Amino acid sequence: MTSTDAWFKSSCHIDTSLWGVTSERLDNLEVLKEDIKADVAVIGAGFCGLSTALHLSERGFDVAIVDAHEPGWGASGRNGGQIIPGLKIMPNEILARYGSERGEQIIKTAGDAPSVVYDIIDKYKIECDLRKTGWIQLSKGPKGAETINSHLTQWGGRNVDVKELDREKISTLVGTDGYYKGLLDNRGGNLHPLKYARGLAKACLSNGARIFKNSPALSVEHTNNNWMVKTVEGSVKAKTVVVCTNGYTGNMLPNLSQSIVPVLTGVIATDPLPKELHEKILPNRQGIADTQRLLSWFGIDAKNRLIFGSRTNSQLESIDKSNFTFGLRRLHEILPQVKDIEIKHLWTGRVALTLDHVPHIHKLADGLYSGLGFNGRGVAMATTFGKILAKHCNGEIEENEFLPITPIKKVPLNQFRGSGITIALTWKRMMDTLQP
Ligand SMILES: Cc1cc2nc3c(=O)[nH]c(=O)nc-3n(C[C@H](O)[C@H](O)[C@H](O)COP(=O)(O)OP(=O)(O)OC[C@H]3O[C@@H](n4cnc5c(N)ncnc54)[C@H](O)[C@@H]3O)c2cc1C
């Protein structure tokens, strides 16, 4: 098997996922088959790589993006499309970790992350079913309500438009009695993620960037003051390289893949819901995520289909129904009224977790950067990271402007990731039952 075959063996759900069948392909991309030069080479065409390229091309840089598959093929084209403000950790913890000066800037940038998405969509007229209807987070019990309370007090205390939801309001806004307490954060929203990724790619092309599909980077080497990104059939010579491969990071660079834990998430999409259901479930069309350790999330697309995500039964990227029984059970517990609605699409995607719950910016050497570890919050955050990475590449990042550059740290025992993830998921499931 050639190395190209190995890449394509990895299962692609883009074509059969709901997002794949409801979004137009980018037909005009080519495979990199020659040796080219650029100012910056970007590896990975998800939100992070595309946003990096977009912000660099806006500054006049000549950018070449290579993707092993196609723009949006990774998590960016498979996710729930929820535009979530902030990092996983709360403002007070950000201040405690990073100090008040840097901490305040991180809080501002993370809190404003949805507007970076909204501004790009507006500027480049990206049609991606954007809805600025807010983001809802729900807890099943008192333990999860601690997270809700922290969000309400810490973001609310900063004049953010965030509202508390009791059982009655949850029932009206969401159409379920399965939750205990919640919040509505009006900074958030939702969109069609693959339309957004492909729209970002078109915006990059319109600014003169080049995008190569089916062109996996096999190595990155420094020679004669330049970086050389070698793909299967060509290469890019550039002063700067940015690696944006997140949960799909391979072994091209030492230890990078070991700095995150890629966890598989399964997504279920139904047939369009009948009127009597879609008028009662999320009538205002927000996206929902819960606070369970084994998190579930859901939303409704532009044609009233329900999209529901949670862990898969195994860490195998199988789209056989047997890999989704946990998710289906959860879905029917939370929304029993959809039990008879046919399931039309099943797909999976990798979420990249970090041990400190924040994404990481690495400077692997002069002119070699990476950004990864979005912890399931990459629609707004990976887009924002692209803006920040472009500033790093251009040397215009201010002191303390955002998260610091950190050295790569291997997650302990990461070589046992398969069995380790299974043990961790079992523990989380038990704790969700004992302390919801
Ligand atoms: C099922 C699911 C649901 C999610 N829901 C949400 C949500 O609702 N809201 C939210 O904010 N976040 C969500 N996330 C997280 C979000 O999707 C990610 O954080 C975000 O898409 C990461 O973007 P990225 O560009 O860093 O990586 P990706 O989109 O994963 O892109 C990485 C790219 O790198 C390419 N690549 C890998 N190796 C190479 C190589 N050697 N050479 C060339 N190319 C390479 C891959 O082909 C891929 O296209 C979800 C994730 C999943 C999986």
Image: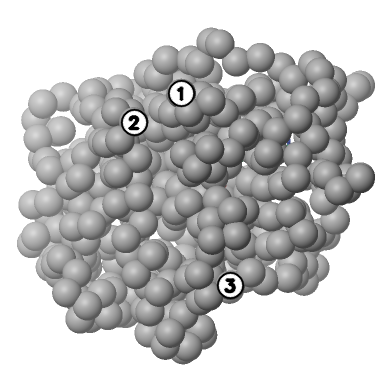
Query: Which residue is at a point 43% across and 84% down the rendered structure image?
Result: 101
Q: Quadrant of the N terminus?
A: top right
Residue 206 circle label: 1
Q: Quadrant of the C terminus?
A: bottom left
Residue 124 circle label: 2
Residue 423: quarter of image: bottom right
Contact (Cβ within 8 Å) of mark 1 with mark 2: yes
Closer-to-camera residue (302/263) = 302
Answer with left or right where residue 152 lies relative to residue 48: left
Question: Between disc 1 and disc 2, whose residue precedes?
Answer: 2
Query: Which residue is at a point 57% across and 28% down the rendered structure image?
Result: 209
C-alpha gap between disc 1 and disc 2: 9 Å
Looking at the picture, how far across and down is residue 256, in whole percent?
76, 56
Looking at the picture, how far across and down is residue 376, in whole percent?
48, 54
Residue on which the image places disc 3 = 404
Question: Between disc 1 and disc 3, whose residue precedes?
Answer: 1
Amino acid type of disc 2? Tyr
Closer-to-camera residue (270/157) = 157
Relative to 182, residue 94 above or below: below
| Secondary structure under the numbered disc 2 in the rendered image | loop
Q: Quadrant of ligand 1?
A: top right
Amino acid type of disc 3? Pro
Relative to 62, residue 208 above or below: above
Closer-to-camera residue (360/410) = 360
Instruction: Using the rendered image of the protein, determine whether residue 210 is visible from the camera's viewpoint.
Output: yes
C-alpha gap between disc 3 and disc 2: 30 Å
| Secondary structure under the numbered disc 1 in the rendered image | helix
Residue 318: quarter of image: top right
